[in-house]
Image (cartoon, grey):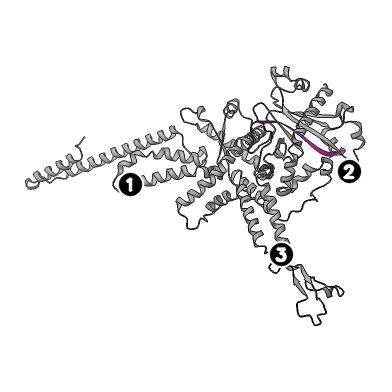
Amino acid sequence: MDFALISKHCRHKEKKLFTAFENRKPLLLDVAREFYPAAIPGLQKGVEEMADGYQHDDDHRMLTTTPMDCMRRGAAGFHGNLTSPTTPWFRFKLPDFMVPDGETTHEQRKLLDDVTQATRWTFSRSNAYPMLHRLYKHLLTFGFGCMIVTADEQRIAKVTTLRIGTYALGVGEDGTVDTVVRRFAWTAGQIIRKFGRELMPQYILDAEKDPTTRFEVCNLIEPNATGDDKAHDPIARELDMSDDTVYRSVFWLKNAEGHTNNGFLRAVGFSVKPFVAPRMECEDGDTYGLGPGIDALDLARGCQSFKFDELNIVGRMSEPAVIAADELKDDGLRLYRGAVNYARFGDQQRAPVVPVFPNPPGPDGAREERADAAQEIARLFYNDAFSVIDAVRRGETGKMTATEVEAHVREAMQRLAPVATLFDSELLDPLVTIMARYTIAAMPTPLTPDQADQLADVDVEYVSAIHLAQKQSVIAGIQQVYDVAAVMAKGGNPEVLHRVDADRMIVTLAELIGCPESCMKSDKQVADAIEADQQAAAQQAQLAQAQAQASAAKDIGSIPLDEEHAGSAIAEAMAQNDGMGGMA
């Protein structure tokens, strides 16, 4: 293996991507000061200093946590309403083109439901949910984030949300993120335990027992060429991984040129993209997105400034500036709160000490300005939209009518819809796909080739609170049409029911609210059930007719034989028989 070639390629990529990231770093640092101080070590300090426990920026005072609270509420809103750990938020289903007759077999439904339940279990068993919450905070604050997702023997999958400032991204020809390079600092013992001794430089082996010295490790994750495409990828030829390896991950020691294997540590292959790197509001050609934190940066600074003004005014009101009489210079003057001030007044008639500002400005103006800034920051972080959804969910809509509630929900969804759609494509689709792949690989009973083919092109349908709220107007419309049709039918217009397809309504509602397919019968099963009901009704009618005919025959057999009653009794029995359609 040509370690020099691999080392040169990886170091070139690492330098190129981090150089591009440095241009954005000052803006990200300003945003982190106001909204996410935990990210400052990664942005401001090197990995060695960061690993030593550097946690705070001593040059910045956060007088109010309002901006940070708004960001946290927004992240919690997306986490609880888009990827809630407590309620199902996705399911697998076959795309329409795979079921052209609209019928899904029982075996297909069972397979899809089983894989859905298993993947949900993997999400719960792994550390995906706490890492997702951290990622939402990164997305809302900085406009981008990155998660590494790898297989794990104990938890099926392991998720790591990378700290802002410790990694850089690269995009492919289609504009999506396809490359991640990251840096982290480990002790020699950690490096040896992770990568073994075989390819380890001697200076790392010598420092194995040193628990204080850290060495910088780099990791490049990028696409790997397979098959005939290896002819155009010399690194893929050198690594010579299997043909199903679509991504490669290379680890090396920084500043280890000239040492064993030029610092190369390990190369790992993946059959699925091992990371998720969503972005918000990303323009064509831009690697990193723009989040609400950047939009609200000036407002956050204003919020801090208004708080400073408020505290300053309150302080001046409690210890105001004063003008003292000249004769007090020799005696001295103490003007601390709670102190006693002694002065010699003599025959002086005027007050010896008066305030400089008889009517100082109050803190109310600063409070109002700060409240306005906080309200706008909350709006930028979607706090108002999530408040509407939470109020509807808890039934705390006050005296609002159903129409007013629907209007508020529709307005909230109009603000959330673009972000939710973006998260679907850049975050949830790849994340669910990766977790499903690891789940299927860990199943105790391997899938048959036919089952694997069926799962190759499944769709992910999202049924979270946000997605259901987006569909609420459609759901409400269906229910309203059904209710109106039922009222009109009871009011003497039963023909209106011919316009309503109740069966299709139920199917559509089940799809909209995310009802599992296993709970719904297929079209064929419904047709068979209808046919069975019709046959049972026909048999029941035949039985009732036979019983009526038997009863008529019995009545005829009991007709009196005397001439007085015979004629009238026969006529009555024949009339009853004619009313029943005649005897067989």
Badge 2 element = loop
In this orientation, which residue lies closer to the viewer: 363 or 237? 363
> Which mark is on residue 314?
3
Q: Nearer the viewer, mark 1 or mark 3?
A: 3
Residue at x 76%, y 20% (from the top left corner):
234
Which residue is more in the foreground, 434 or 111?
434
Q: Earlier in the sequence, mark 3 or mark 2?
A: 2
The quadrant where residue 283 appears:
top right
Q: Residue at x 20, y 37 (%)?
A: 581
Q: Is residue 386 left or right of residue 48?
A: left
**Residue 543 showing in the rendered view:** yes
Q: Quadrant of residue 242?
A: top right
Amino acid type of the residue that numbered disc 2 sits on in the rendered structure = Thr
Q: Main secondary structure of the magenta part?
A: strand
Marks 3 and 2: which is nearer the front?
3
- Mark 2 lies on residue: 212
Q: Amino acid at mark 1?
A: Met
What residue occupies the far right of the structure in this picture?
A: 206
Q: Which residue is mark 1?
A: 488
Q: Position of residue 142 (x, y in %)?
A: 69, 42
Range shown magenta: 173-187
